[in-house]
Amino acid sequence: MRQVSCTLTIAGTDPSGGAGIQADLKTFQELKSYGMSVVTSVVSQNTTGVKDVHHLPENFIMSQLKAISEDMPVQALKTGMIANKKMMKVISEWLDEVDAPYVMDPVMVAQSGDPLIEKEDQRYLKKYLVPKTALVTPNIPETEVLVGGIIETEADMREAAEVIVKDLGAGAALVKGGHLNGRAVDFLYDGQRFHEFESERIDSSNTHGTGCTYSAAITAYLSQGHALPQAVKEAKHFVTEAIRHSFDLGKGSGPTNHFALREEVFNQWL
Ligand SMILES: Nc1ncnc2c1ncn2[C@@H]1O[C@H](COP(=O)(O)OP(=O)(O)O)[C@@H](O)[C@H]1O
Ligand SMILES: Cc1ncc(COP(=O)(O)O)c(N)n1
């Protein structure tokens, strides 16, 4: 019988295809994992920003989650945009029935600056979801919300990663440095030690969906049995190449290139 790893994303949509559920499914597919998705919010957005948002009722989110868990295996899962407390609560309840590593991308604001989660509900991510994670992957502004403080240096990033694990109860924390100047470095704290993942900073404004793509890639590698530091290392390579070969599409911050590791496709474009 053919075996395949199954990965699930629970997130909002991006009709322009660079972020959210669409980015997650493209990433799963590229990394040879069978992708599944549960929509939380339908977001009308493109590379320039968010136009409108329609939140699905929490009972409908639960219905989708049950449709997956009563029928399909899940080897690893991730969450992206979860707009409000009611959604967080049902997802948290459902997670109690699932035995698979859970990666949380604590999405709060789109690259364009538009909010994707109700501000007063941000704190409920910590209460309902962070303690159930195998990994949380905040960028700098999200880290500041999670730990309450300003992150300006690499030392601050490391300290925050430790707080997210030791005080907030995450399984591990990957604090991403894309929003700081200088090298693009991320710090993983796994409860025992730090791991550092570095790449050169690529001169590109096409970074729409980088956080989604990165956390989806980590999820795909975890579903295939990689240990966490190895999964992050491979995913960092994937997202770096996706930024390096990103598409100049749209009028705003363009999407990353999920084909970037495929030489045969890539050579055709050169
Ligand atoms: N210009 C860039 N060059 C290389 N890597 C980058 C660049 N911008 C972001 N990254 C990397 O992309 C990943 C996503 O980072 P970040 O921008 O911090 O998150 P988010 O997309 O959630 O805001 C991280 O590994 C970060 O280091
Ligand atoms: C539905 C959804 N989820 C997440 C993001 C964040 O992506 P990014 O910060 O990389 O623009 C987004 N724009 N839309």
Image: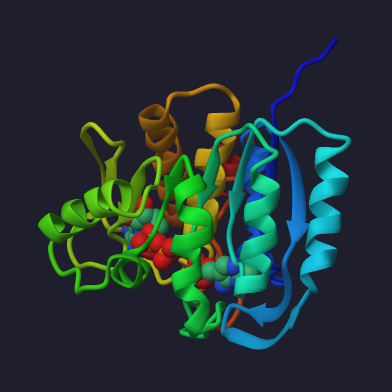
* Between 175 and 203, the one nearer to me in the picture: 175
Give the quadrant of residue 144: bottom left
Viewer can see residue 54: yes
- Check the image and tell me how it is coloured: rainbow
Marker count (numbered): 0
Give the quadrant of residue 157: bottom left
Extreme residue in the bottom direction: 51
Q: In which quarter of the image is the N terminus?
A: top right
Give the percent coordinates (x, y) of residue 217. Answer: 54, 42
Extreme residue in the top direction: 1
Is 236 left or right of 124, judged from the image as shown?
left
Q: In this view, does 39 lie above or below 250?
A: above
Give the percent coordinates (x, y) of residue 15. Answer: 74, 72
* Between 59 and 213, the one nearer to me in the picture: 59
Q: In this view, does 161 lie above or below 108?
A: above
Name which residue lies at 80% across and 74% down. Answer: 57
Name which residue lies at 54% across and 21% down. Answer: 225
Give the percent coordinates (x, y) of residue 49. Answer: 57, 84
Give the percent coordinates (x, y) of residue 64. Answer: 84, 55
